[in-house]
Image (cartoon, rainbow, N blue to C red):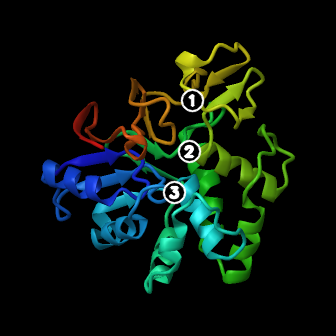
């Protein structure tokens, strides 16, 4: 029995299948965590979703920003943008099954056995893991709610504000902040607020006014580990307790699979574009 974590798939079906075959992945015994952005940009988003759905409970995906954008587009709330590949999903006969499957997925997963949090973008440094999981449960309830509640939620989901967490946020504001932390965060400003504009590799960032989220001390993290994706410009990032696995296959890089244990992590497979 093995537990694997894979970086952003982004509609890249062939490297996903190739990587699992190389690992000898068994749906009966093994577990695969996908750290979000299952769809978009790559050529076969629909096939990625079908394949993951067929693998059943052995696959434990979380939602990234592109997955949430697909839900918004499928609901007709936002016109599908020209550089997206969502339309290929919209035109498939099983599109409703795919959308319903995505709606059941969380923004974060906690693997207690391996002492590991899986989240697309990262863990906001003011939150403990239990804080984050508590907040994301509210989002998941809205995703799985009746149609009217679900559509109202999608209409208010996107936006760059609020940039900071405080107790007098409205329900819509606090939900948006949690979503941005989980699916869009890379840098924080010097005051701890989200900076959602900068995407460069930190090595190319000269400003002292912004810092990667993982460089800010989080005393509430303890001995837990955080596995994330979302940041192709960062590339493979191994700085325990933080592990970034978005190595940008869709940009000509690789698809990275890591095998994790209670106190271990190893890069077990990389499939190159």
The tag earlier along the polypeptide, 1 or 3, is 3
Instruction: Give the mark toward the camera: 3 or 2.
Output: 3
Is 236 or 188 nearer to us in this picture? 236
- Location of the C terminus by quadrant is top left
Rendered image quadrant of residue 261: top left
Please report the residue visible at 28 percent of the width from the left and 62 percent of the height from the top.
Answer: 58
Residue on which disc 1 sits: 220
Residue at 43% in and 83% down? 94
The percent coordinates of residue 185 (x first, y second) are 62, 38
Residue count near mark 2 (Cα–Cα under 10 Å), binned few <14, some 14–19, many ≥20: few
Residue 43 placed where, x, y %? 40, 61
Report the disc number at residue 130. 2
Pointer 1 or 2: first along the chain: 2
Q: 111 or 14, which lies in front?
A: 14
Closer mark to the observer between disc 1 and disc 3: 3
Q: Which residue is mark 3?
A: 63
SS of the residue under disc 1 = loop
C-alpha gap between disc 1 and disc 2: 10 Å
Q: Residue at x 36, y 64 (%)?
A: 48
Callout 3: SS:
loop
Figure check: 141 above or below 30: below
The image position of residue 253, as x and y in percent, is 36, 38
Q: Earlier in the sequence, mark 3 or mark 2?
A: 3
């Amino acid at each position: 029995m093995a537990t694997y974590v894979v970086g952003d798939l982004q509609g890249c079906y062939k490297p996903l299948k190739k990587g699992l075959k190389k690992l000898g992945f068994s749906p009966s015994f093994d577990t695969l965590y996908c750290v979000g952005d299952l769809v978009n940009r790559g050529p076969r988003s629909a096939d990625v979703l079908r394949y993951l759905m067929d693998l059943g409970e052995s696959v434990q995906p979380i939602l990234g920003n592109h997955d949430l954008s697909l839900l918004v587009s499928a609901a007709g709330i936002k016109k599908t943008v020209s550089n997206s590949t969502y339309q290929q999903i919209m035109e498939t006969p099983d599109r409703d099954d795919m959308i319903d499957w995505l709606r059941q997925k969380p923004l974060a997963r906690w693997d207690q056995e391996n002492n590991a949090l899986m989240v697309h973008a990262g863990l906001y440094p003011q939150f403990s893991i239990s804080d984050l999981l508590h907040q994301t449960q509210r989002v998941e309830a809205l995703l799985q709610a009746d149609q009217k509640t679900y559509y109202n939620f999608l209409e208010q989901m996107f936006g760059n504000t609020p940039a900071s967490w405080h107790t007098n946020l409205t329900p819509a504001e606090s939900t948006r902040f949690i979503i941005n932390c989980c699916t869009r965060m890379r840098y924080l400003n010097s005051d701890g607020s989200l900076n959602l504009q900068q995407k460069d590799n930190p090595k190319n960032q000269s400003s002292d006014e912004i810092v990667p989220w993982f460089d800010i001390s989080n005393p509430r993290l303890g001995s837990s580990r955080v596995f994330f994706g979302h940041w192709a410009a960062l590339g493979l990032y191994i700085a325990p307790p933080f592990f970034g696995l978005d190595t940008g296959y869709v940009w000509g890089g690789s698809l990275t699979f890591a095998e994790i244990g209670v106190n271990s992590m190893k890069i077990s497979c990389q499939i190159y574009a």
